[in-house]
Image: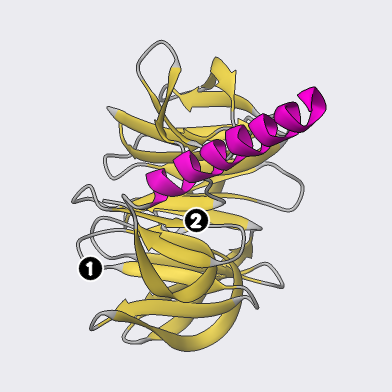
Amino acid sequence: MFKILIIISSILLSSSSIFSQNEKDTEWTKVDGKLSQIAVGEKGAIWGIGLDHTVWKWDDGKFSQLKGVVQSISVGKDGSTWCVGLEGRIYKYENNSWTTIPGSLQSISVGDANNIWGISDDESVWRRVGDKWTKVNFSKAKQISVGFDGSVWCLKNDASVWKWDGSNFVKQTGELKLIVVKNKDEIWGLNFFNQAVKWSGEKWEIIYEGSLENFSIGEDGSIWGVKANGNVYKIK
């Protein structure tokens, strides 16, 4: 009898934990579509990458597919949209089509037309200066994020967090699996429990407990997220 009570108690505790997680999710609005990555810029400028690497753009309240297959996409506060194809080629969206840009990257991040950074296949960091790519003295980068004001943070392969001070990357507190920069005052990320966290200036504080795989913040403060199964949510 004692063992049965223990088992029942365990089930109830487990159910309560699951309910709490789902209850948090009710703060989010599910949006039709399946994505692996999402990018939000100026109001209404929302782009995504499908589970099969296809390109999707939010238009008239739904996601519509565009031409191309990509591994990274980013949109700035001025609507500037860049992506990286599966083969590493770089593209800029203009006049409703993709224009090839010289260079090769594995991922890209856009703050606006004048703040574009990327990571190459050898894990080095590059920034766009004028119409050329300039290599930054930093290696083993895993992911980079550029804010709408030009603030730049990145993660190394060991999950360590680094902030660009204008001339060098300086190590910060904590370890993350994703970094998301809106501006110098709003630095977000995903911890290894897939919780959305925000930098307080001293530590990373949990903001949303519901599990996410990828998310992005728009200039207007809107937050869109993607779960591991590809489901898309507007969180704020």
Q: CA distance from mark 2 to mark 1?
A: 29 Å
Q: Residue at 79% x, 28% y: name it.
A: 1
- Looking at the rendered structure, the kind of residue marked 2 is Lys
Tell me residue 19's x, y (percent).
48, 44
**Earlier-in-chain disc, 2 versus 1:** 1
- Looking at the rendered structure, the kind of residue marked 1 is Gly
Tell me residue 34's x, y (percent).
52, 74
Tell me residue 149's x, y (percent).
26, 39
Tell me residue 50's x, y (percent).
56, 75
Identify the secondary structure beneath mark 2.
strand
Q: In the rendered view, tell whether residue 48 sits above or below residue 209.
A: below
For label 1, the residue is 44
Task: Specify few, some or many for label 1: CA neighbours under 10 Å numbering under 14, 14-19, or 20 or more.
Answer: some
For label 2, the residue is 132
Residue furthest toward the front? Answer: 1
Q: Main secondary structure of the magenta part?
A: helix
Residue extent of the magenta highlight: 1-25
Quadrant in which residue 40 is drawn: bottom left
- 225 or 15, nearer to the observer: 15
